[in-house]
Amino acid sequence: DTDGGKTGQVNALTVLNASGFAFGMPARVTAQVQPGDGKVVDVERLAAFGGPTHTKGVQILTGYLNGRYAHGQPLSLSASIAFEQSYGPIDGDSASAAELIGILSAIADVPVRQGIAITGSVNQHGFMQPIGGANEKIEGFFDVCAMRGLAGHHGVIIPRANVVNLMLRDDVVEAARDGCFNIYAVETVDEAIEVLTGLKAGARRAGGRFPRGTFNAAVADRLEYFARPRLMRPV
């Protein structure tokens, strides 16, 4: 999808390498959540498609969720993430930003803009780390959007550290210059959330709560709801 918004669904950017050539290929990442014991299920790993670097990236997401939202209560979440219609090996951690935002969107029940794709590795503190194949990834999503008709709301999110690597085709540069296609360079997950949802991410206040009406407040409230049965369970 390159238009509208979907909850728990994010367009990730991937690269296929074959015979010395690299091709950018957008991929749909989906997430489902429910109350649980704090585990994130990597469907690619269970299907023996996910490589060790991808598995490591998924495990880092649990660290981020615990550090960001599990303050004073256990992370009572069971989540699953998957690349839809992938039939071969997947490796690397450059999809961890897309996977994390898919999970957060599903928790908060807030839709993600489908006209914007994202690539980036995330660390446990929510900072976006550089990735490889930035040019091919951007051009791959641009081609999909251009075939369907650029409408000004299409674009990609990349780590700010990758800006120095950009050497894009002339048609992509021209579309960006004309405002038909956008490239957002971000440093944190919160910045990416604001681009993809249109909501303020919200920073945790001194009292431990996020400002009402922000994306992170919606995530924290849902996780608190998930944790109630565990907190109220008799010992």
Image (cartoon, rainbow, N blue to C red):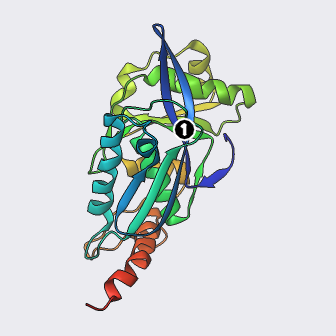
Task: Identify which residue, 151 or 122, lies in the foreground.
Answer: 122
Q: Residue at x 40, y 67 (%)?
A: 77
In the picture, residue 57 is in which quadrant?
A: top left
Q: Residue at x 33, y 59 (%)?
A: 65
In the picture, residue 142 is in which quadrant?
A: top right
Q: How many marks?
A: 1
Residue at the bottom extreme, as displayed: 234
In percent of width and height, residue 43 lies at: 46, 47
Q: Mark 1 sits on what residue?
A: 117
Dot 1 amino acid type? Ala
In this rendering, does residue 200 appear at all?
Answer: no
Q: Secondary structure at mark 1?
A: strand
Residue 3's place in the image compared with 205, above or below, is above
Task: Identify which residue, 156 or 34, lies in the foreground.
Answer: 34
In the picture, residue 133 is in which quadrant?
A: top left
Residue 158's place in the image compared with 82, above or below, is above
Q: Residue at x 27, y 50 (%)?
A: 124
Quarter of the image where the N terminus is located = top right
